[in-house]
Amino acid sequence: MSFQTNTPITSLTTLRLPATAAHFIILKNLDQLPEIADYIHQHDIPFMVLGEGSNTLFQSDYPGLIILNQLSGKQVTDSSENKLTLQVAAGENWHQLVTWTVDKGYGGIENLALIPGTAGAAPVQNIAAYGQNFDDAFLCLTAYDINTKQSITMAKAACEFGYRDSYFRHTKHSLIITDITLQLNTCHQLQTDYYSMGVKYESIAKELETIAQPPYSINHVYQSVINIRTRQLPDWHVIPTAGSFFKNPLITKHKLTELQTKIP
C-alpha cells in the first residue's frame, strides 16, 4: 500500500480551493485499515476522511493524513414482505445509491436524490431534504477505530442524530465509517407535501403535476426532486460550489408569538 506525501487535494472538494495534504491514501478495501492505523500512530499525525468533499473547506494545507474513502459495494442483507435491509459501503456515491434503490423499487430515500457526497458522509451530516430524513431510514453503521484497531457497530441511538447533526460532528473520535445499513420499503409511503413558503417551484406536489399523473410513484418523486434541485443549484462539477447548506432557524414559542403580532 502506497502512502503519498505533499499531495494536492484541490480537486477532491467541490469548492476546489488550493490545498495540499502532508500525507494521503486512498482507502479501497478493509484490509488496509490496520496499516493506516499504524501509519497514523507512527507519524503521530491527525487524520481526516474525505468522501466527495462537499461541505468541506480547507483554510490551509492539511498537516495530517487525508483518507479518501472509496470503499464500494452494497447488498440486501434481509427482506420481508414490505421491508428490506440494505448494507452499503461508505465510499459509494450517494446519488448513485438513491438512483439504484429507486430503480429496484426500494423506497425511503428517494427525496434525498442529487445530494452530493458518499454513503459514509450521510450519517455525519444526517442529511435531509424535501421532507425526508436520513435517520428515518437508518438502522446502524460499522466504523473502524484507529486507536483500538477494532470494528464497532453503532445503532441509531449511539449516533446521536439531531437536526443536520450527529455524534461525528461534535465529538473528537478516532473512527472511520466503513458501511451503513438502511431499512427501506417496497410498500411505498410517498413524502410529497414539502413546500417552501412563497416559492411555488419548490413544491414537490406542484412539480409532480407537471411530469406525471396520479397515482405517483417513487420514480416520480425522485425525478421531481432532481428537477427542482437542478433549477435551483449550479452543477458543482462545472462551477465550484458548496451547494445548498443551511439550517432553518429555531426560535422559542415566545419569540414566535412576538413575531406574529408584527407579521400576522
Image: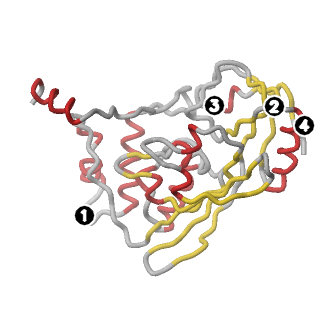
Give me the disc on residue 51.
Answer: none
Sequence-first disc among 1 and 4:
4
Q: Earlier in the sequence, mark 3 or mark 1?
A: 3
Whether residue 151 sits left or right of residue 239 in the image: it is right
The residue tagged 3 is: 13
Instruction: Name the spot of residue 157 as percent of width and height, x first.
Output: 51, 56
From the image, tell me which residue sits under label 2. 45
> Are circles 4 and 3 on residues that touch, CB within 8 Å?
no
Q: Residues within 10 Å of mark 3 (few under 14, many from 20)?
A: many
Task: Name the quarter where the C terminus is drawn.
Answer: top left
> Which x, y percent locates residue 209?
24, 53
Rounded to the nearest whole Å, what is the CA distance between mark 1 and mark 2? 56 Å
**Labels 2 and 3: the sequence-earlier one:** 3
Determine the residue positioned at 55% across, 51% down: 159
Q: Which residue is mark 1?
A: 214
Decide: is 238 above or below 110.
Answer: above
Q: Which residue is mark 4?
A: 42
| Amino acid found under the numbered disc labelled 3 | Thr
Disc 4 or 3, which lies upstream in sequence? 3
What's the coloring here? secondary structure
Marks 4 and 3, how far apart at CA = 27 Å
Which of pointers 1 and 2 lies earlier in the amino acid sequence?
2
Of marks 4 and 3, the one in the foreground: 4
| Above-or-below relation of 245 to 103 | above
| Image depth: mark 1 or mark 4 in front | 4
